[in-house]
Image (spheres, grey):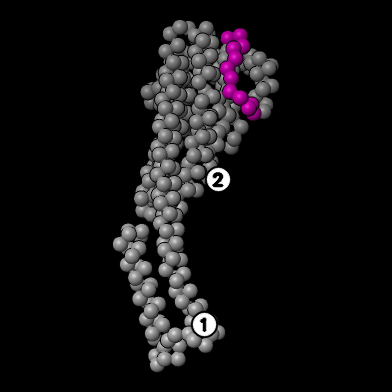
Amino acid sequence: MSEFDIHPLVAEELLSPSAKPKVEQFHSSLFLILHFPYFDHVAKTANHMEVDFIVGKQFIVTAHYDGENPFRGFERTFEVGSLLDTVTPGDHAGHVFYSMTKALYREVEEMISVFGERLDYVEEKIFAGRERDMVFEISKISRDLLTFTQALNTHRAVLESLEIAGKRIFGEAFGHYLRSIGGTQFRLGTLLEGHRGSLEELRETNNSMLSTKQNETMKTLTIMAFITLPLTVITQMFSMNAKDIPILGMKGDFWIILSIMVALALGLFIYFRAKQWF
């Protein structure tokens, strides 16, 4: 705080995570909070991490509250580029902030591309007859997509305010860079909406195929019940404790009754088949 003349309110807010993203201007620096979605490979679910930026004309300070360093890839690229003179930081720290934010969005875009692969997998398994297994997978993808969408949607209003405040500090020309960040956020949001639309289509297809299979199963069970019902009635009739039951006592009575039952079952089977009930 003393080294970079950071406002005490900002320094205090850096001590703990913040629930909501925001952007504020303090003297000649910007304080920005954004939540970036990511895949938690330990919990096997999507989550979001908070990244705080304090951007002055000649410095940039970042803070995050998770164990994973969100800037690890950017740091390597920036350090190598600086050594090879292929990276130019620009005439103020706003350009570094721009590069860092774009790098974070690129990582988010790579994660979003994984949704496409997961949707392709679900589609393949649905049409391979594994609709029941895909119910849970579709629900997991829906939850992860919702987490990504909610996290990125909070950026929109913050980036709009950032463009206004950023131009006051870094000049009108820097507005182009800030609009580019906003455009990237909008494009990623559009990609997510596309994946959510595809997921809903797959969900409806999966539900329809599951329903069709269940209907076919119920139809088969119903037909079996229709076939076995008269056979049960015949069995009960010949098991009655009566004196004048026909056929009983005749030579080969068991085989005669069995033949009647088989003939009746075959007749019902042929009738249902002719009606195309199965």
Q: Residue at x 53, y 18 (%)?
A: 157
Visible residue check, residue 36: no
Element at badge 1?
loop
x%, y% of residue 125?
A: 39, 51
Q: Residue furthest bottom?
A: 251
- Identify the residue position indicated by label 2 in the image: 42
Residue beneath the point at 50% across and 48% down = 136
Front tag of 2 and 1: 1
Nearer-the-camera pick, 179 or 72? 179
Q: Residue 21, relative to residue 127: is it above or below?
A: above
Q: Quadrant of the C terminus?
A: bottom left
Circle 1 packing at 10 Å, graded few (<14), some (14-19), many (20+), is few
Q: Quadrant of the N terminus?
A: top right
Using the rendered view, name the quadrant where residue 32 is placed.
Answer: top right
Badge 2 local density, few (<14 within 10 Å), some, or many (20+)?
few
Residue 183 at what x, y percent from top left? 42, 20
Image coordinates for residue 112, horizontal then vertical, percent: 43, 35
Q: Quadrant of residue 48?
A: top right
- Viewer-proximal residue among 226 and 84: 226
What residue is rendered at 36% in x and 58% in y? 277
Asked if residue 26 is among those painted magenta in the image, a careful observer would answer: yes
Horizontal side of residue 193 vs 147, given as left or right: left
Vertical placement of 86 versus 259: above or below? Answer: above
Q: As shown in the figure, which amino acid type bears the numbered disc 1?
A: Ser
127 relative to 191, above or below: below
Q: Quadrant of residue 262?
A: bottom left
In the depicted view, which residue is nearer to us: 28 or 130? Answer: 130
Magenta-colored stretch includes residue 246: no
Residue that label 1 marks: 239
Q: Which residues are magenta?
A: 17-28
